[in-house]
């Protein structure tokens, strides 16, 4: 074998493998861009994700690893980890009640509603579905769960989702009494950003990769970095390490227990309903 052949062979194999790779795309978004009626993917029955959460507040940022267990639109269990092997906080949300336990503070809070009082103040005004629903392909905050109920949406005012073209790759829609704007990549249909038009809430989707576990390995893309912003700036960054759709649970994750002796927080974590 001639000198230099192994590097040449490696380069050739790399080029072949790159050519065979599945390019990230969002078929429902591609249909929207073409002016066709999209078929949005149904959510999985359940989902587990390993995440890194980076919170921003007052010019400072802090990060923690996290695990999310979800029954889309029905139950969410989020565990935040501090020191190795130790859970710093847990949040459990259902349509009737949510509970937040801060183990490192030996305290807990409870409430009800579509938002949960945790994290930076701006996040207390965010609907819980909007924080997580992109993990199963629901990229339109405000409409979280509504598109999945019908499975499709067209482009006219009478559509179930009301997505109306407002420019090349740009769509407007109304949700919860507010106007929203979503920006899609014209080539791939990937949703790049969705913003409430009063600038009080914006979510940015970045670093898409094809695959991710379960039905997501069939060419559908998943953003690996998501930023959540208010008009004051960035509140949260979510980085995806691993996602598994319809996992085989070793034990039921959908419960939370407040340890005896923990004090209840009422004023420190005030419940604020989203505007």
Image: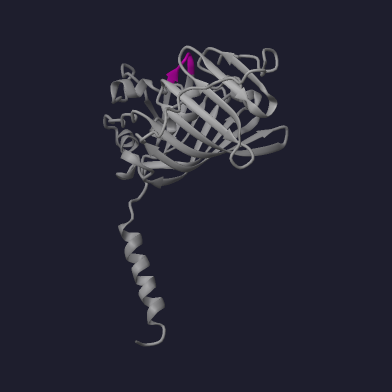
> Would you say residue 222 is visible in this rendering?
yes
- The outermost residue toward the front is 260
Q: Position of residue 93 (x, y in %)?
A: 50, 20
Which of the 4 quarters of the picture holds residue 81? top right
Image colouring: one colour
In the rendered image, the vertical position of residue 251 relative to residue 225, given as above or below: above
* Magenta-colored stretch includes residue 76: no
Q: Residue visible at 34% across and 34% down?
A: 246
The N terminus lies in quadrant: bottom left
Q: Number of labelled discs?
A: 0
- Prevailing secondary structure class for the magenta stretch in the rendered image: strand
Left/right of residue 227 with respect to residue 71 in the rendered view: right
Residue 86, quarter of the rendered image:
top right
Look at the image and tell me whether residue 185 can be seen: no
Q: In the visual, does 106 lie left or right of 114?
A: right
Using the image as rendered, state which of residue 275 and residue 66 is in the foreground. Answer: 66
Q: Please, is residue 125 above or below residue 169 in the view?
A: above
Q: Looking at the image, which residue is at 37% across and 88% down?
A: 2
- Rendering quarter of residue 238: top right
Task: Using residue 93 as the reference point, say whether residue 3 is left or right of it.
Answer: left
Q: Is residue 176 magenta?
A: yes
Which of 9 and 183 lies nearest the eye of the viewer? 9
**Residue 72 image point, x, y percent:** 40, 25
Across and down, in percent, residue 107 comes to 66, 21
Region in magenta: 174-178
> What is the x, y in percent for residue 146?
37, 20
Figure check: 229 above or below 17: above
Quarter that holds the C terminus: top right
Q: Residue at x 59, y 19 (%)?
A: 258
Along the line of sight, the residue nearer the viewer: 138 or 244: 244
């Amino acid at each position: 074998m001639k000198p230099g052949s192994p590097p040449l062979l490696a380069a050739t194999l790399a080029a072949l493998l790159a050519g065979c790779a599945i390019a990230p795309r969002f078929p429902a978004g591609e249909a929207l861009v073409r002016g066709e009626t999209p078929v949005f993917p149904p959510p999985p029955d359940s989902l587990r994700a390993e995440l890194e959460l980076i919170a921003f507040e007052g010019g400072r940022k802090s990060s923690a690893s996290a695990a999310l267990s979800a029954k889309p639109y029905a139950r969410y269990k989020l565990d935040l980890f501090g020191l190795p092997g130790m859970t710093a906080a847990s949040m459990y949300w259902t349509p009737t009640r949510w509970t937040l336990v801060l183990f490192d503070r030996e305290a807990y809070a409870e409430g009800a509603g579509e938002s949960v009082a945790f994290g930076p103040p701006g996040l207390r005004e965010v609907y819980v579905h909007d924080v997580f629903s992109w993990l199963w392909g629901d990229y339109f905050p405000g409409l979280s769960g509504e598109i999945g109920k019908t499975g499709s949406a067209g482009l006219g005012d009478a559509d179930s989702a009301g997505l109306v073209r407002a420019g090349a790759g740009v769509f407007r829609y109304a949700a919860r009494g507010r106007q929203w704007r979503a920006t899609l990549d014209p080539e791939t249909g990937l949703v790049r950003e969705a913003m409430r038009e009063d600038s009080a809430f914006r979510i940015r989707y970045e670093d898409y990769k094809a695959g991710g576990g379960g039905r997501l390995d069939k060419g559908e893309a998943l953003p690996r970095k998501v930023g959540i912003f208010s008009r004051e700036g960035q509140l949260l960054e979510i980085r995806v390490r691993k996602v598994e759709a319809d996992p085989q649970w070793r034990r039921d994750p959908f419960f939370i227990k407040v340890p005896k002796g923990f004090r209840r927080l009422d004023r420190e974590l005030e419940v604020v309903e989203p505007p």
